[in-house]
Amino acid sequence: MRSIVRRSLVSVAGLMLTGGGVAGPAIAAQAAPIESRPAVAVPPEPAGEGKRVLEHDYQRQPNGYYCAPAATRIALSTQGKDPSQKEVAQKLGTTEAGTNSADDTTRVLNEVTGGGYETTEIKSATAKPEQVDKLRTDVVEAVDAKRGVVANTLGTAVDTDGDRHPFPGGHYVTVVGYRDGGDAMEIADPYGPEKHYWIDDEKLADWIAERGYSS
């Protein structure tokens, strides 16, 4: 499957908060270091009709380019796996320029858990209705099987509370739950500072557009 390689290959979460911009392809932009903290165990929320949230260990990324290792580690924790972010980064091939694509997160998730993950690409600039439907189905199936989903996103998303999450150079987040039958999904964001928030399925699909996700 063709990889979706990030054009800038860099996570610029910190730059957005400080008003910075994306460097050109020859220069790796890097966000300021984020305070590294131990994993925080997040218990599962009580299941209701059309809702499920997985138990997981939340960790923030320690720097501006470890979003993929952190998001992948959060997903691995839903299956009881607890490698360090450094170990995950080595498996992903993460550098100061970032992590290439969802193909890498899928490969590492399968390597550590024994399989079950697939990569789905959304190649268009915005998600089509059938791609939104597939994302919703994939997330519900994965969460029901106790598998966190890793999404490679691009641009800005607005969550259900109206808060914006801008990452013009790309970002990786973990989907750890759903509600309303999958119409909304809970994000564990390794950058923070909100850490967890809900986002509509259509908005998440558009956020993933031109990238892909591992489910």
Image (spheres, grey):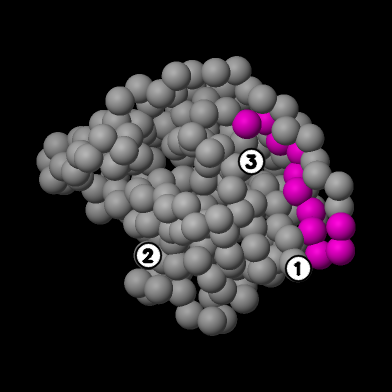
Q: Is residue 49 magenta?
A: yes
Q: CA distance from mark 1 to mark 2?
A: 25 Å
Residue name at image x 30 percent, y 52 percent: 168
Q: CA distance from mark 3 to mark 1?
A: 20 Å
Disc 1 crowd, CA 10 A, few/some/many (<14, 14-19, 20+)? some
Disc 3 crowd, CA 10 A, few/some/many (<14, 14-19, 20+)? many
Instruction: Point out the stretch of residues depicted in magenta.
Output: 48-58
Q: Are marks 3 and 1 in contact (CB under 8 Å)?
A: no
Q: Are marks 1 and 2 in contact (CB under 8 Å)?
A: no
Rendered view: 165 above or below 12 = below
As shown in the figure, which amino acid type bears the numbered disc 3? Ala
Give the quadrant of residue 58. Answer: top right
- SS of the residue under disc 1: helix
Residue name at image x 81 percent, y 65 percent: 50
Disc 2 crowd, CA 10 A, few/some/many (<14, 14-19, 20+)? many
Between disc 3 and disc 1, the foreground one is 1
- SS of the residue under disc 2: loop
Rendered view: 29 above or below 168 = above
Mark 3 = which residue? Answer: 75
Q: CA distance from mark 2 to mark 3?
A: 22 Å
Disc sitting over residue 181 in the figure: 1
Name the side, left or right, on which 30 lies relative to 167: left
- SS of the residue under disc 3: helix
Measured from the top left, where is residue 109 in percent x and y?
61, 42
Rendered view: 57 above or below 187 = above
Mark 2 = which residue? Answer: 210
Give the mark, 3 or 1, whose residue is nearer the N terminus.
Answer: 3
Q: Quadrant of the C terminus?
A: bottom right
As shown in the figure, which amino acid type bears the numbered disc 2? Glu
Residue nearest the viewer, comparing 163 with 130: 163
Q: Are marks 2 and 3 in contact (CB under 8 Å)?
A: no
